[in-house]
Image (tube, rainbow, N blue to C red):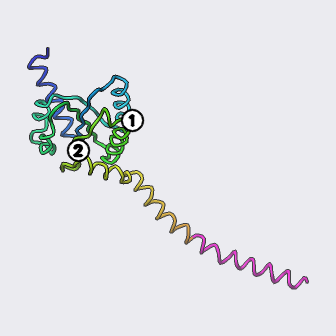
Amino acid sequence: MKTRERKQNDLNALAEQLQNSKSAMIVSFNKLTVTKDQEFRNQLREAGAKYQVVKNTIARLAVKDTPYEDASEHFKGVTGIVWTENDPVVLAKTISKFIKANGDVYKLKAGVVDGKVVSSAQVEVIASLPSKEELISKLLYVINAQAQRIVTVINAVPRDLAVVIKQIGEKKEA
């Protein structure tokens, strides 16, 4: 059994990690097997997220005076918290993809993105958005495409001139 000091240390560690995170999701599960739990944890780790099954009272105390305090009403039943310091879209995509495949085991209760509580339906909408990296690559493509068009137009004048000179030379020979 955990001592009061150990519980306090766990509470402080969880509160500190949540304080540094950008978004969090609250999940519930039932009939969980070890393989499903390991699979879920591995996918979250690959996405750069952290996952912890917590007691509801500790979770409520950990989110007190944080942007996640409004989500404390969802700490009922079996509760796991997933949080990340990275892009919230990546976290939402990872969780929704896994829950779609394993809806009989996992359920998304709610999420907190940028300090606002979002429902599971809103998490699905967030998951459909492109990630930050995808948006940056699309922006760079648009910027690069315009530069490529300019270069093509600039190169067209000498190329067209060379074609006309070549045709004039062939016409004189004939």
Magenta stretch, main secondary structure, is helix
Left or right, residue 89 beside residue 24: right
Q: CA distance from mark 2 to mark 1?
A: 19 Å
Q: Check residue 50 for magenta coloring.
A: no
Q: Quadrant of the N terminus?
A: top left
Q: Residue 43 versus residue 157: which sits nearer the camera?
A: 43
Q: Amino acid at mark 1?
A: Glu
Q: Amino acid at mark 2?
A: Gly
Instruction: Residue under label 2, please give it.
Output: 111
Viewer-nearest of discs 2 and 1: 2
Q: Residue furthest right?
A: 174
Instruction: Residue under label 1, please give it.
Output: 46
Q: Check residue 165 for magenta coloring.
A: yes
Q: Tell me where residue 8 appears, x and y as whole percent.
A: 11, 25
Task: State the SS at label 1.
Answer: helix
Rendered residue at 71%/79% (across/down): 161
Corner quadrant of residue 69? top left
Q: Residue furthest top?
A: 1
**Numbered range of the magenta stretch:** 151-174
Mark closest to the chain's N terminus, 2 or 1: 1
Q: Tell me where residue 23 appears, x and y as whole percent.
A: 24, 44
Corner quadrant of residue 164? bottom right
Q: Tell me where residue 88 appears, x and y as whole percent.
A: 30, 46
Mark 2 neighbour density, 10 Å: few (under 14) some (14–19) many (20 or more): many
Task: State the SS at label 2.
Answer: strand
The correct choice, above or below, for 131 with respect to 81 in the image is below
